Amino acid sequence: MSSPLRGLRIARRSRHVWLSRPLWSRRLVFLVGSIAVALAAVGFALAATFANEQLGRLVRAWPCAAFVLAPAGLAASSYLGRRYFDGAQGSGIPQTIAALGHPSPALRERLLNLRIAGGKIGLTLLGLICGASIGREGPTVQIGAAIMYSLSRVSSFPHESMKRGLILAGGAAGIAAAFNAPLAGVVFAIEEMSRSFSTRTSGIVLAAVIVAGIVSLSLLGNYTYFGQTHATLGLTDGLAAVVLCGTVGGLLGGTFARLLLASGPALGGRLAALRRGRPVAFAALCGVALAGVGWLSENTVYGTGYAETRAILSGSAAIPHSFGLLKLAATVISYASGIPGGIFSPSLAVGAGLGQDVALLLPAAPVAAVAVLGMVSYFSGVVQAPITAFVIVLEMTRDSDMALPSMAASLIAYGFSRLVSPQPVYKALAKSFRPPAA
């Protein structure tokens, strides 16, 4: 083909790209959607912080308040979720994975709509202010995906890969904006939600994360989620800490994943019958158990665990050494109740508590450094996404000196977790949201 003809075709194609009304309509929808996801994530984060603070003030003034709040709050959240927001229960990440893996419009409409997104926000905040050990990260993923998918109906997105990319982008943008962790948002979308990398969707995900990150940065500033740590480890102590944290975090993370799966649809015996027949009463019973665990922990296991994790990393307050295991128990109980809420922040808090315990065996090692390894290891063990685990913890602490130890600990934890829980927890939970095979 002659050079002038090739140049003419390129010019026509370029003009089509720049002047096409459908293309600009899609870009506008994408831009508005990314901004909306960021605003929702930031607002949700601020509201969750307020809810945690109010609960903290209340239990300090009245230590037994949880024995009233937790049963009533979990029961109310269970009732409202089942009655008005079916599909909002649990983390939100399994719902998003289910919507990504199944192209059924009916399934996506049921799991990713604005009503579910609003219910997810409201019921998660209700759970937090009543003491549930839950996080806002999984809900933020579902909220972001729901916003993006709902807006996709405004314009024409003809290819399935484009619709799938919007769902992925919404979830990634939610993570990035909620924690000021853009790299973690991208890695999480690729490794955990899609379990693959597609050139068709990679640009959409990156662009959404950039837009959401800019909005979050303009509203909240360039903050670090857990504060910047400067922890380092020597060679001998570092090797021991990596092996211990990787082993303990992987085994306990895998155990936690198995407990979550067992407390979900697979729950058996009389408890299963009670939950099927009287789900609100079952949630109230979980609230009583949660308050009991909270009393044993000196009221440290409620909410996201953000304050306790930050205290362990900074050494600003004494956190009981029972915190890690009791926080694990409180999170299992909260999830079993069937209320909306994530396991992301509570898992990082459990990991920090376990790291604090492992540090007792290594007196020469800084507690903050071992706690970072505990967070990476336990989170890797829970979600079995080793790259996401060390990237997101390092981005939340900005401690580059811990990069290599964190990678090693995350990989070890992943291996041990697979021995206990062969299937990744989010992938396994996603199956319960998919329609049965014909």
Image (cartoon, helix red, strand yellow):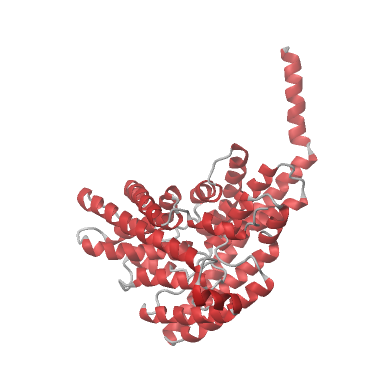
Q: Residue at x 56, y 71 (%)?
A: 338
**Residue 353 falls in image quadrant:** bottom left
Q: Is residue 370 above or below residue 72?
A: above
Is 138 placed left or right of 25 in the picture? left
Is 63 placed left or right of 49 in the picture? left
Quadrant assignment for the N terminus: top right
Question: Residue 269 in the image: x percent, y percent?
Answer: 50, 74
Q: Residue at x 61, y 54 (%)?
A: 98
Question: Residue 129 in the image: x percent, y percent?
Answer: 53, 77
Question: Residue 230 in the image: x percent, y percent?
Answer: 32, 55
Q: Can residue 120 be seen in this snapshot?
A: yes
Q: Residue at x 43, y 69 (%)?
A: 305
Q: How many numbered marks does the figure carry?
A: 0
Q: Residue furthest top?
A: 2
Question: Residue 307 in the image: x percent, y percent?
Answer: 42, 69
Is 41 placed left or right of 384 in the picture? right
Q: Is residue 86 above or below residue 362?
A: below
Q: Residue at x 59, y 75 (%)?
A: 276
Is 352 placed left or right of 304 in the picture? left
Front residue (pair 46, 268): 268
Q: Can residue 398 be seen in this snapshot?
A: no
Front residue (pair 160, 353): 160
